[in-house]
Amino acid sequence: MQKDVLRIGFLGLGTVGTGAMKILEKNEVEISRKLGVRLEVRRVAVRNLDKLRDTNLAPEIFTDNLDHVVNDPEIDIVVEVMGGVDSARKAIARALENGKFVVTANKDLLAQFGVELLAIAKNQGKNIFYEASVGGGIPLIRPLKHCLVANRIEKVMGIINGTTNYILTKMSCEGREFEEALAEAQAKGFAEADPASDVEGRDASYKLAILASLAFSSKIDLDDIYVEGITGVKLRDICYAQELGYTVKLLAMGEETDGRLKLRVHPTLIPTLHPLAAVANEFNAIFLVGDAVGEVMFYGRGAGSLPTGSAICADIIDAARCIKNEVENGIVEATFGKKAVVPMEEQQSRFYLRLKAKDEPGVFAKLATAFGEAEVSLDMIMQKRSEAGTAEIVLVTHDVSEGDFAKAMRTLQEVPAIYSINSILRVVE
């Protein structure tokens, strides 16, 4: 018997949850018209019942017990926006086992335990919807699962962390040092009080794990992703990159070659004419290459109450359609195998290198010899400034394996004329 009303339970009601709630309240009539069934928020579990919340919900709807949501037989869809991993994992598992569809924005959870939870969902004939876990309001998960499913995705490359993009934009456009740009991002709410997950690249690696699993139909282990953050990026390097025709971005990159995957997150010099170079401030963008569709880019706000709430509401509506039409939504992720990952030392990169050397004749020749002995070919080499007998030199290599470049660095450290290696960044054309 078809229901006239589908009931929703929320786990958490912070910034993102409140954004989703506002959309449900504001667009209630339009959503009901599109669905042919009314959505009703039945229960909301929160940590603090005394906190004032910007919603029209009656006080009796709130509870501080997660079980009142996940075990309620009247609730059809559970929306997890509480964050964290352990409690959310247990709550989602119980909700699925109780026959409920689940919507979540929890990237940390999905990157670590998505395979486990999707298996539970499959066994229960339900599904987990997680569009909001990557890219905020930008449609990414749905296109990969549906619109681009006929393609073999060759490459995924993107800016998927708004905090680091905001910081790098301020450094590039306003000449701020890292610490100053970070402080401004925190003051404006774009960065957490503890920004480590963002600036160290972990947040982007979680999102890449989710995107890469869909793009390459493979189970992804976080340990297979090389991760490097932006804390070592200096304003001087950004300025030199601009002189060379590049912009510095924290990129998440996935690629499949000959059945093996390359997965990495690190600050990267990209040409200023590349579409990703123009993505500024807190915005995100994902650049995809499919064998049939060619190059595609998705762009928009990667975080925020309403953009992320929009994606959550879209998932709620998808889950409601499955219930209304009595569809056991097939879980494509449950069919994924495990593809081999190319070790980082075997992957190819171009490198930007800034170092200090003794300002004397023949230094360039010594550098060229050291790189030549390590079989590293140089594309550019230039002296930027000289002070008190010390020269600052910038190099850009041709493509070289990470392993061979590491050998070249060890060789350079043995050259007496080289005082210090101050910066190493990768370059993508």
Image: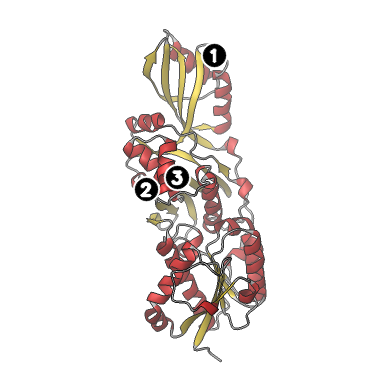
Residue 72, image quadrant: bottom right
**Residue 243: image location, x then y, percent:** 32, 30
Q: Secondary structure at mark 1?
A: loop
Farthest bottom residue in view: 1
Residue 64, image quadrant: bottom right
Q: Residue at x 58, y 78 (%)?
A: 328
Farthest front residue in view: 50
The residue that disc 1 covers is 415
**Residue 227: image location, x then y, percent:** 56, 42
Residue kind at label 3, given as amino acid type: Thr
Q: Quick one: label 1, few (<14), some, or many (20+) residues within 10 Å?
A: some
Q: Quick one: label 3, few (<14), some, or many (20+) residues within 10 Å?
A: many
Q: Residue at x 52, y 53 (%)?
A: 207
Residue kind at label 2, given as amino acid type: Asn
Farthest top residue in view: 361
Residue situated in front as seen by the camera: 236 or 272:
236
Q: Residue at x 41, y 38 (%)?
A: 180
The vertical placement of 313 against 385, above or below, is: below
Q: Which mark is residue 91?
A: none
Indicate the quadrant containing the C terminus: top left, top right, bottom left or bottom right. Answer: top left
The residue that disc 3 covers is 164
Residue situated in front as seen by the camera: 65 or 145:
65
**Residue 102: image location, x then y, percent:** 57, 71
Q: CA distance from mark 1 to mark 3?
A: 35 Å
Q: CA distance from mark 2 to mark 1?
A: 41 Å
Indicate the quadrant containing the N terminus: top left, top right, bottom left or bottom right. Answer: bottom right
Q: Which-is-in-front pick, marks 2 and 1? A: 2
